[in-house]
């Protein structure tokens, strides 16, 4: 690794840290309903939205009403997108003549974008992809509102922790509208303009057909990509406008666009812990959560860079270049693979299936930890807060004191539901991976024998249950409804299997009294708690997935270094 490679990594992390308080304060102000410099322009739009929808933003909801609104809104979004995909051939703005989508792929795609996963069983361009109209009004809309849903649930949990002896957690419709209008859209406009300046395509023209040097005609795709790429990165969505995602030069043409898109993967995720600290009035608490996430991120970046730069022991001195864009190089590709799996984004600028066993294994492990290394917008924070409650509970058991978090007692109800939210995604991954490996229809899609084939299955369900969307493309998942239907179920279980416990915990915590810390109460705003929190995250991840990882990427790594492959 050269000094230039180290500079890229240091610059990447430094910019993330620098922007964290700026975006975090902005997000906190938006969720608290404070006026901003955008209010004179967007205030009338916000008020008009409420009038048209018949919403009173000042009328707050308890946890049951808030959760009901979340579920109904997401169900409506799924249904509209599902029908749009089934009928896109007959909808306007379809210059490429895109066909209607197969029912099982439409089902998986609608669930995927509604849950902010953006797993894709289709290639973005071509007659079997997505029309411009559905890209904008279907996928594009879900890119915004699925991200805003995560932010809204996060806001409800923060209010539950902050308020005392109360019953309401805010208004979902107001949180959804404000986070979209005042936060996601303005940042997306800035990023989209930066991408257009670098050559990312933004056009409604159809594909161009040109003669090749050998006389064979070549089809060059086109479309409104820049506007979609901006929110796909910022909203931790990840679904590519083109089939090759951000390896495609029309999505990611220059080193500058590559850095902008990589930063966009984590910018808002980094801002969420800071916003949490601002909203509860204890910024140090936010920095401790941020520190735990950053420690995990930096560690996995280092391990991935080592694995990819070390290369294949059978070819000493050569980096792992298979499946990577030479113009981007190993460092940018490895850094992106960690950032996209740490942020639950899923966009790629290299093929993860072609990475070294440990490089691909680290990307897989990031997802299996439960979407807590910054994670999706809102999701990463509320996932880590559930881990924080479990950590406080375990420490309370060791010292024989009733556990407390932010001055409120953590009781059996909070611990039980925290465990449900933490363990359900992992259980989903293991059960569905086991089912795929044990059935003939599941094994038929494996293109690589041995431990890599098992890793492909684990990655498939780990990505979908982990709200990620990236893939080990060696698994031919599009050939049968088995993976599309089972994957859709995995995404639903994991997404709402976390949101429902979070809302129950928020409803329980908001009604409790707060008390000043007594002698012996464990502090949750120091480095010791940060280290304990990271340890609990790693222990839960290791206990849940180590046997599966040992049979997949770890075994493949050992076989590679022994000079033997199955």
Image: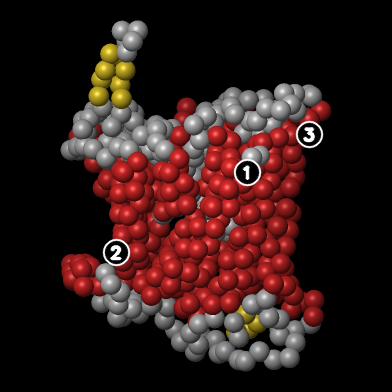
Residue at horizontal 25%, vertical 24%? 208
Tell me the quadrant of the picture where the N terminus can be found: top right
- The image position of residue 246, as x and y in percent, is 44, 38
Which residue is the site of mark 3? Answer: 558
- Nearer to me, 389 or 35: 35
Disc 3 packing (10 Å; few <14; some 14–19; many ≥20)? some
Residue at horizontal 50%, vertical 82%? 281
Query: From this viewpoint, which residue is outermost toward the right?
Result: 562
310 is higher (above) or lower (below) than 209: below
Q: Which disc, if any, is residue 557?
A: none
Please, which colouring scheme is shown?
A: secondary structure
Helix, strand or loop at label 3? It is: helix
The answer to which image quadrant residue 394 occupies is bottom right
Q: Mark 1–mark 3 contact, CB under 8 Å? A: no
124 left or right of 270? left
Which residue is the site of mark 1? Answer: 3
Which residue is the site of mark 2? Answer: 181
Helix, strand or loop at label 1? It is: helix
């Amino acid at each position: 690794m050269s000094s230039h490679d180290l500079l890229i990594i240091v610059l990447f992390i430094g910019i993330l840290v620098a922007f964290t308080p700026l975006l975090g304060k902005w997000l906190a102000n938006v969720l608290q309903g404070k006026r901003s410099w955008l209010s004179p322009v967007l205030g009338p739009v916000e008020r008009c939205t409420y009038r048209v929808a018949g919403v009173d933003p000042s009328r707050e909801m308890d946890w049951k009403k808030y959760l009901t609104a979340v579920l109904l809104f997401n169900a409506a979004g799924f249904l509209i997108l599902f029908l749009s995909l089934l009928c896109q051939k007959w909808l306007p703005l379809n210059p490429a003549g895109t066909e209607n989508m197969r029912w099982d792929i439409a089902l998986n795609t609608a669930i995927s974008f509604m849950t902010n996963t953006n797993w894709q069983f289709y290639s973005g361009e071509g007659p079997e992809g997505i029309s411009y109209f559905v890209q904008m009004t279907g996928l594009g809309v879900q890119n915004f509102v699925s991200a805003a849903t995560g932010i809204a649930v996060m806001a409800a949990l923060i209010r539950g922790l902050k308020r005392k002896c109360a019953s309401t957690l805010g208004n979902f419709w107001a949180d959804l509208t404000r986070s979209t209008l005042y936060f996601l859209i303005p940042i997306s406009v800035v990023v989209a303009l930066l991408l257009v300046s670098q050559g990312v395509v933004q056009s409604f023209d159809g594909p161009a057909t040109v003669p090749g040097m050998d006389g064979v005609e070549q089809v060059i795709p086109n479309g409104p990509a820049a506007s979609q790429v901006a929110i796909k990165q910022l909203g931790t969505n990840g679904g590519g406008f083109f089939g090759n995602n951000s390896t495609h030069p029309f999505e990611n043409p220059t080193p500058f666009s590559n850095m902008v898109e990589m930063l966009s993967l984590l910018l808002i995720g980094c801002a969420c812990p800071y916003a949490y600290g601002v909203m509860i009035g204890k910024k140090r608490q936010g920095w401790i959560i941020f520190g735990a996430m950053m420690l995990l991120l930096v560690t996995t970046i280092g391990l991935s860079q080592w694995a990819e730069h070390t290369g294949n022991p059978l070819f000493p001195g050569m980096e792992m270049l298979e499946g990577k864009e030479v113009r981007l190089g190993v460092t940018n590709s490895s850094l992106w693979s960690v950032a996209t799996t740490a942020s639950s984004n899923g966009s790629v600028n290299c093929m993860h299936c072609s990475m070294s066993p440990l490089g691909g294994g680290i990307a897989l492990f990031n997802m299996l930890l439960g979407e807590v290394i910054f994670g999706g917008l809102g999701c990463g924070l509320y996932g880590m807060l559930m881990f924080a409650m479990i950590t406080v509970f375990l420490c309370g058991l060791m010292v024989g004191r009733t556990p407390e978090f932010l001055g409120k007692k953590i009781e059996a109800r909070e611990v039980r539901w925290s465990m449900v939210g933490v363990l359900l995604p992992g259980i989903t991954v293991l059960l569905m991976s086991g089912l795929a490996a044990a059935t003939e229809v599941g094994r038929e899609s494996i293109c690589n024998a041995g431990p890599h084939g098992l890793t492909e299955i684990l990655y498939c369900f780990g990505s979908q249950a982990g709200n990620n969307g990236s893939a080990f493309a060696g698994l031919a998942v599009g050939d049968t409804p088995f993976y599309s239907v089972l994957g859709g179920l995995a995404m639903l279980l994991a997404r709402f299997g976390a949101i429902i416990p979070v809302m129950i915990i928020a409803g329980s915590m908001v009604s409790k009294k707060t008390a000043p810390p007594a002698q012996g109460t464990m502090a949750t705003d120091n480095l010791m708690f940060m280290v304990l929190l990271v340890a609990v995250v790693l222990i839960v991840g290791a206990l849940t997935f180590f046997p599966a990882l040992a049979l997949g990427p770890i075994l493949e790594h050992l076989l590679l270094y022994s000079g033997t492959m199955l």
